[in-house]
Amino acid sequence: MAAIIVTKNTELMQRIIEEIKTCFDPEIPVDVWELGLIYELHLDDENNLKIVMTLTSPNCPVAESLPAEVENKCKLVAGVKSAELKLTFEPTWEKEMMSEVAQLELGFM
């Protein structure tokens, strides 16, 4: 499942995605973007960012810190006015949501 991306500012969105790719689940050596944990990114005309994200499981040991890290790093991207992250578990994350890069890295392909 690819993330839903809504924006008119594709250059800023690309910088946001690159920043998200610096966030890793410490138990899995793959970034949260490639893992498919980012479900939606909405960047409005004023550069306010809304992020919808999940975790590999509701009991994930980094349930408190990882979403905060993603939100905080996105706030620091030059040009982003604000960033707000919503954590969801619908739909439930499954390994098929990972990119081919992540699946290769983890030996699923």
Image (cartoon, helix red, strand yellow):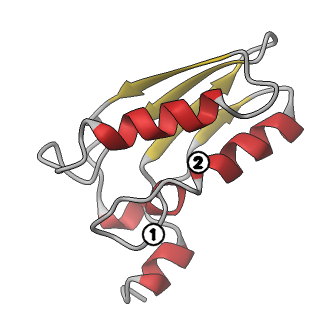
Q: Position of residue 70 (x, y in %)?
A: 49, 39
User: What residue is drawn where x is 32% and y is 66%?
Assistant: 95
Quadrant containing the C terminus in the rendered view: bottom left
Q: Position of residue 97 (x, y in %)?
A: 41, 60
Whether 51 is drawn above or below 93: the answer is: above
* Residue closest to the eye, 2 or 45: 45
Q: Which secondary structure lies at badge 1?
A: loop
Residue at numbered disc 2: 20
Amino acid type, mark 1: Val
Q: Which mark is residue 43?
A: none
Q: Which secondary structure lies at badge 2?
A: helix
What is the CA distance from the residue labelled 2 to the residue labelled 1? 12 Å
Whether 100 is drawn above or below 6: the answer is: below
Mark 2 or 1 closer to N-term?
2
The residue sitting at the top extreme is 46
Residue at numbered disc 1: 30
